[in-house]
Image (spheres, grey):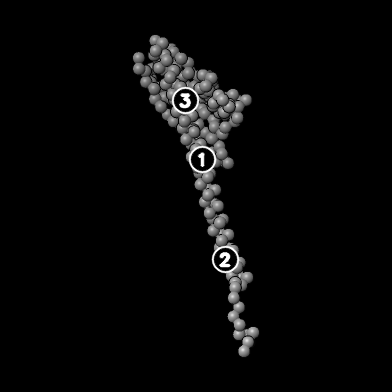
Amino acid sequence: MNNPILKIKKGFSIVEALVAISIVSLAITSATAVVQGSLQNSQITRFRIQSIHFANEAVEFARNLRDTDIVSEKTFSNGELKTFVNACNSDDGCFLDVLNNTYGKCNKDGCDKIYLTEGVGYNSDENGNETPFKRRVTVNEISGDEISVTVDVSFSVRGYDETVSVTSYLMNHE
């Protein structure tokens, strides 16, 4: 006897298929969100590391001026370092282009952006590719034999703004 009413139907119902598709979609969406967050965090971390390098570069620039003054037998108070101190001692600070060995006061809107010029490197040449970085150097004279160099490097990426600050103290080693 072949009774069609008593036959067991095999397979998934539409409701079961929709539930399964929803669960798979939720898992894929969650994984995508985690990957996207990780990529953004890695980019921000990369920019932080670059900011620290830009800040340390400015501190090393000041340290080099001090050491060059010592070698050329100029004093701590009247050599090239003193010129740098005078240019960068205001609240606005100064910009610094290490490659071109130039610096000067920042305007009220802030310091110039840092650009990347192919085959040359990072500088303040607006003909290069604009980077998200701005650097401001502030130098304060603590005493006749000591200065502080504070470098703020800020960047903005996808609506996220951050500033990395590095402060170093330079002593007169004459």
Which of labels 2 and 1 is toward the front? 2
Quadrant of the image occupied by residue 13: bottom right
- Helix, strand or loop at label 1? It is helix
Between discs 3 and 2, the one toward the N terminus:
2
Quadrant of the drawing holding the N terminus: bottom right
Amino acid on which the number 2 mark rests in the picture = Ala
Outermost bottom residue = 1
Image point (64%, 84%), residue name: 4
Residue 142 in view here: no
Pinpoint residue 126: horizontal percent, then vertical percent: 61, 25
Tag 2–tag 1 contact (CB < 8 Å) = no
**Relative side of 150 to 29, left or right:** left
Pinpoint residue 115: horizontal percent, then vertical percent: 57, 28
- The residue wearing badge 3 is 58
- The residue wearing badge 1 is 44
Quadrant of the drawing holding the C terminus: top left
Image point (55%, 37%), residue name: 156
Amino acid on which the number 1 mark rests in the picture = Ile
The relative height of residue 15 versus residue 60 in the rendered view (above or below) is below
Which residue is at the front of the view, 24 or 99? 24
The relative height of residue 21 versus residue 118 in the rendered view (above or below) is below
